[in-house]
Every structure is written in C-alpha cells, then in structure tokens.
Image: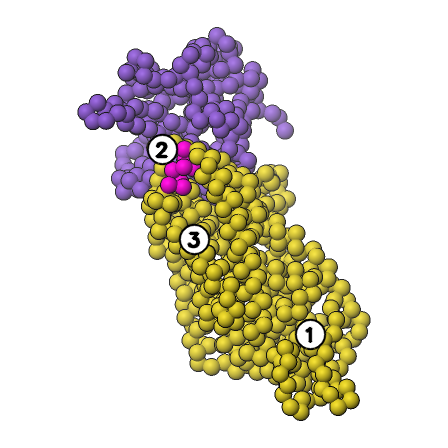
Amino acid sequence: MAKDANPSAEIHRRWVLVVDLDRCTGCQACVVACHAENNVPVVGEKQAAYGRWMHWIIIQRYWEGEYPNVKARFMPVMCQQCTEAPCEPVCPVFATYHSEEGLNAQIYNRCIGTRFCGSACPYKVRTYNWFRPEFPEPLTEQLNPDVTVRTRGIMEKCTFCIQRIRRTEIDSQAEGRIPADGEIQPACVQTCPTNTLLFGDLNDPDSRASQLARSHRSFRLLPELGTDPGVIYLKGGETNA
Amino acid sequence: MPEPDHSPLDTPQSTPYDERLLLAQRTDAEINQAVLQPMMQTGMGFWVLVGFLSLVVVWGLYAWGFLVYWGIGVTGKNRPVYWTLFITTFVFWVGISHAGTMISAVLRLLKADWRRPITRGAEAMTAFALMMAALYPLIHLGRVWKFYWMIPYPNNRLMWPNFQSPLMWDMVAIFTYLIGSSLYLYLALIPDMAMGRDHTNGWRYRLYRALALGWRGTEGEWHKLHRALGIFSVAIIPIFLSVHSIVSWDFAVTIQPRWHSTIFAPYFVIGAVYSGLSALASILVVVRRGMRLQEFLRAEHFNALGKLVLVAGMAWVYFWFAGFIVEWYGNEPVVRELIHEEVAGRLSPLFYLQMSANLIPIVLLVFKRIRTTPALLLAATLLVNIGMFTERALIVIGSLQRNDLPFNWGTYRPTWVEISIVAMTFAGFALLYTLFSRVIPFVPVWEIKEGRLRYTVRRIGRLLVPTAAEID
C-alpha cells in the first residue's frame, strides 16, 4: 500500500493555536466562521438552551468583580489537540486517534456514538449530534465541499481545519516549496478581527507561534492534568485590564 | 445417591433441627410434587402479571424505537452530561447480577448448607440481570446499527476495536460472565431436568428430555457433575470480581473529578454484592409466596441471607466512607463543588435518600425478627436497592454535571424515553424471571434431597435421634 505523502508528518510539525486573551472581545466571529467552514449544524434556540449547542469554538464568558465594577472575561476554548489526549484511549472503535502530525483526529464514519470521549474530555469541547443535522435555508447553499456533513449520533470537534492545512500543503508542494509561517490559516484565525488567534508550528523555533509560546504570558489550559495541549493561551489582564 | 431414611416421626419432637427435619419426613416423590405442582398450576393472577409486564416491555421497545429513529436527543442528555440513566441502570443491573455467583459459587465452596434451596433462584437472577445489563451498551449508542464494530471480527480493512478502551473490557467481561453463569446455571439444572422429564408429559416432557441430555443418575454422572460444579465455582469467582471492577473502570480511568479514584473497583464490587444479595432476598420473598415454597424457603434461609446482606452493607459503608473522606480532605475545587452539591446543594435530596436507604436496612437487619419475617425483610432489602440505584445515579449523572471549567457545568432532566426504557428492563427482568419459574424448578430438587441427607432422624434402639452428617 502506497503511503500517502504527509508533509506535516515528515517535517515533524506540531501545530499550535495561540490565543491572546488580551485581544479577544468576545465577538464570536470565529464561531460563525467555524460553523461555515466546517458544516457545523445549527441546533436552534431550544436545544442550545439545554446545553446542546454544537460550536467547535466556545467563547467562555466569565464575570469578574462585583457590580458596578464588573468585567467580562472572554476565553475561546476549542479542542486543545492534546498530546496526551484523555479522549483517545477510551474510544472502543478508534474513531478518535492521534494523527502523525500530533493532532487528535476524529473519524466521523467510524464513530458509533458511545460519547465516552465526551465524558473523558476535561475541556468538554467535543460536541455531539443529538439529532439529524439541520441546515435551514439558505445555509445549504454554502456547505463546504471539503468537509463531511456528519450524521446524527456521532461526535465531532475542532480539527484545526485539517482540510485547510492539507490544501495549503498540497498547493505549495505543487509549487515545490513548503508552506511559509502563517500561510496556513484555520477559518477562525482568518476571521478574527482583533488577531486574537494565530496558527503555526511549535517545532519551528522561528515561527511567530513558537515565539509567542515562549512569552511570559503563555499558559496552557488545565496544565495540572498533564494533557500537554496544542492550544497556547496568552494571559489576559495586562492591556485589557 | 443413597436412599435417605424415610421413617416417619411418631411424635414431633422439639429440637433445633425441627425445621430442617420437615423435609426429612417427606418422600422424594412428595418433594418432586411440591416443586412441580406450583409450576404447572397457574392462576389468573399469574397471567395478569405476565400481561402487565409484557405491556411495559412493549412500551419500552416502542420508546427504544423512537430513540433509534430520532436520535439520542430525545433523551435528556446534553453536554457535559453525556451519560445518564442508561449507564446508571447498566451499572445497577451488573450489580444485581453479582449475587448469583456470590451465593452459588462462594457458598458452594464454603459448603454452606443453607444455600441449597436458593442457588437456582440466585443463578437465574444473575443470568437475567446480565441480559438486561447487556442491552444498555446497545441502547446508549448513538448509532446502534453499527454496534458490531465493537466486535473483533476479521474484515478486509483490518480494522479492530480498541482494546485500550474500558468499553471493550466491559464487553469481554460481560459476555464471559454471561456465558459462564449460564453454563453454571445449566449444569446444576441437568438432574432436575431429568426429574422433570420423568414426571411430566406433553411439551414439558419434550423440553425436559432435551435439556436433561439423557441424564440417568448413575454414580459416574454424579461424580462428573460434582467435579464440573467444583471447577466452575472456582473459575467463576475471579470473573465475578473482574466484571464489576471493569464497570467501575469505565469511570475511574477517566480524569473526571470524583470518578478518577483508586477505590472505585472494590467499592463497586462490594456495592454490587450488597445490592445483589438484597435483590435476591426480595425476589425470594415474593417467589416463595407466589409459588407456595414455604416448605423449602424457611426462616433459617432468610436469616442467613439477611446476615450476609448485613455484612455486605457494613462493608459498603466502610468503602464509601474510605472514598469519601479522602475526597473531602483532598478539597480539590471541582470535587469540593461536587461534594457541596451532594451534601447541601441541588443533589442533596438524592444524597440523603441514598444514605438513608443504604444505612437504615443495616440497622434493621441486625434484628433476627426482621431477618426472618418475610414482609420486613422485603421492605429492608427493597430499600437497599433504592439506595444503590440512587448511589449509581449520583456517581454517573451527579459527577458529570461539574467539571474543571465552570462554563461547562450543566444539568440534566430525564425524559419519558429514558424512563420508559429503564422501566422496560425492570419489567423485562421480572417477566423473564416469572416465566422461568414456571418452566424450570425454582428450587434445585437434587440439591435439597442431597442436603436432606444431612439432617435426618434415625432410630437408635427406642430413641429417635436427629443426626447431622458431613457431606458435600
């Protein structure tokens, strides 16, 4: 069997997403972009109120302080693409597994819907198709042909827009080069109006993401759990106080 | 088997063996009839019960069909409460299934004589409870029609299930236990099937003849049966311990606060024994009345069973406390929040129901009068299972409502679909058990006859002396 060329794996990429909490305004543009890019269904008001919204990025909002000195804090949380992912070993059918380039891949067609990964995930970023996905008109007109439309009864989650990574790599390969730093942009990164999000290769010491990861503001979510996430947060509160 | 002494007592004597001697006065034929008669005489009440249970099962099947057609969304699950009543009831049924082997294998090895009339009822309970438990891993799947992907069958894509997943351990353990306990139940059934074959006609005769496998009761056959039962009794104990340990690891191997605990395996096993023995006591009280088996299931049996429930209950409290106090003192933020929810928050009604329903029976069962009065024993043991069901609900549903990021906290409301399906398995269990008790002798006749040899009355000169002998 011929092995598919996977440039990311060959040059040992470690894709990371840097989230600057000082810049996030909580506008949810990334959430909308993600829905559009990844064919994420819209569940409607009633289901969403019951905790069944399916956003792959969740803008978590926390209030700080007492009225009237209240501050809203926003923290976009998407799949953390853990190196030691708690979701992976518990799946009975290998529907979630670790890809060669260090991402948590979810094979929609293989998923049988035990929801064990969802219970095991400490960040609760996996979303479940509770019903048949519905795309009210005219959303059906803009479904992304690069991404599977999932059926009911299966798990899905942020993929770091794997289809965009692949497309950029293939395009640049055709031009005989490797993708430059910042050339690959997941939908959320492309859309964010305040440049909160930045995508890059942690294993390239010169990449912008790598430099930010070394910043004194950088931290990972729930580091005490030892999951070694691929999403790097930059602590807020310095300029956004 | 040697023939027992059938000499009737001239005058009833008052000895500690009185109750046991009741059977010694009966002939083999009378015992056969006493067991077979209630099986064949079915009154109106029986059919009303069967009809009602069938209705509940049919309604539950409709609910399951509704669930499959529309999706898991028709249940009350959401994010983060991905597992709810289905997994709770799954754990409950696996727990119930534990008493069968506990009674049968452990007590057989210990040569506890009082086990004899209740082994079959216990083993049947194991088999049927496991069947109900085995439904839930299917019911709770998002795409149940793909369930066979969990089975390691050869396929041209070389795709295998993930044996790192506790769900796979679950499947292996449950099927091993189901096969093992069914064989164990059947082995001990063969001599009774032969007895049934010799005393019935019509469809029963044909059924019993097939199941008796040509048993004739020769010395060689008895020898082989005892050997096989001896081997099974030893072999099934590690399986019985492993099954509920594995069920506990479904939870304990994740890093969900309050699930990630080293004490979960023994805590679940002892909880399973506690709830399983209680369920057995409840069932025996009901069946004894329904099938007029007062002669076989006597105060001494309920007394001994009640004591076992008492011991299991105290062990459960110990394990619960050992787990709880470490979590309490550990004082990690999410665990602290969960304990607060239980002790003083929204979950507190369930928590206090669990604690009182698990603790009160322990106090009650201290008294012999309660252990030996069927109605009181029934009340105490039903209470235990209310407590144990609530305990599992708190572990599964309660814990999932809180996690490391407060934004992801959630709540849960059950829907009619979930409640109907849970009711379906309770009714299904009762239905299987009821039908079983009319087809298969509920008390193992050969074991009773064998045990009867121990307590008999022999004439020594002019005296009638009750004697006890040492036999397997």
Q: Secondary structure at mark 2?
A: helix
Label 2 packing within 10 angstroms: few (<14), some (14-19), many (20+): few
Rendered residue at 70%/61% (across/down): B109
Q: Are marks 3 and 1 on the same chain?
A: yes
* Rendered shade, chain B: yellow
Q: CA distance from mark 1 to mark 2?
A: 61 Å
Q: What subunit carries mark 3?
A: B
| Residue A75 appearing in the image | yes
Kind of residue at badge 2: Pro
Secondary structure under tag 3 reads helix
Chain A rendered in what hue?
purple
To which residue does mark 3 refer? B355
Could you say which disc has been placed on residue A145 in the image?
Answer: none
The x and y percentages for residue B418 are 39, 54
Q: Which mark is residue B451?
A: 1
Q: Nearer the viewer, residue A170 or B152?
A: B152
Q: Are marks 1 and 2 in contact (CB under 8 Å)?
A: no
Label 2, on which residue? B406
Residue B335 in the magenta stretch? The answer is yes
Q: Which SS type dominates the magenta stretch?
A: helix
Mark 1: secondary structure:
helix
In this picture, which residue range is highlighted in magenta?
Answer: B333-340
Q: Quadrant of the C terminus of chain B?
A: bottom right
N-term mark: 3 or 1: 3
Which of the pair B14/A43 is nearer the observer? B14
| Chain letter for mark 2 | B
Residue at the image point whose x is 31% and y is 24% from the top:
A74
- Amino acid type, residue under disc 1 in the picture: Gly
Q: Is residue B46 above or below residue B354?
A: below
The mark lying in front, picked from 2 and 3, is: 3
Q: Chain of mark 1?
A: B
